[in-house]
Amino acid sequence: MANVLGAKIKELRKQKGLTLEQLAEKIGSGKSYIWEIENKGVKRPSAEKLAAIAKELDVTTDYLLDNEQTEISEGLTKEMYFRKLGQLDEDDQKRIMDMIDAWSKK
């Protein structure tokens, strides 16, 4: 069985320009753990680590775990945008909404 999860993580990591070490550091893990996921297919990666990897790679854990979904859809892109927006403080969210309003009036 192909390691779809590992292939997705490797591809996304490279698209972001991250090394194994950099991704591992960002999620509080070791380089060998990321390498094993990408190359050997860790049988049961922890939900915590998968969530951290997904966050760093700007995707959802659902995308990473879905063997059928091999391309990032427009819906996933929008979902990640809204997640990031929701993590901003209220003032920053208002500024972004003001910019969107200004652009939509053009």
Image (cartoon, rainbow, N blue to C red):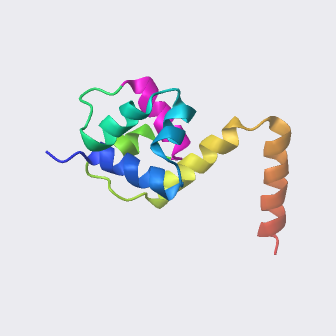
- Furthest residue toward left: 1
Relative to residue 80, is residue 63 drawn left or right?
left
State which quadrant residue 22 falls in.
top right
Q: Is the residue 34 above or below the residue 3 in the image?
A: above
Number of on-image labels: 0
Instruction: Pinpoint residue 53: horizontal percent, then vertical percent.
Output: 47, 37
Which of these two is toward me, 105 or 74?
74
Q: Which secondary structure class fits the magenta region best?
A: helix
Which of these two is toward me, 23 or 84?
23
Q: Residue at x 53, y 55 (%)?
A: 17
Q: Residue at x 49, y 47 (%)?
A: 19
Which of these two is toward me, 15 or 47?
15
Q: Quadrant of the C terminus?
A: bottom right
The boundaries of the magenta stretch are 46-58
Instruction: Pinpoint residue 92: horizontal percent, then vertical percent.
Output: 82, 43
Q: Residue at x 43, y 34 (%)?
A: 31
Q: Quadrant of the N terminus?
A: top left
Question: Does residue 65 appear in the picture of this structure?
Answer: no
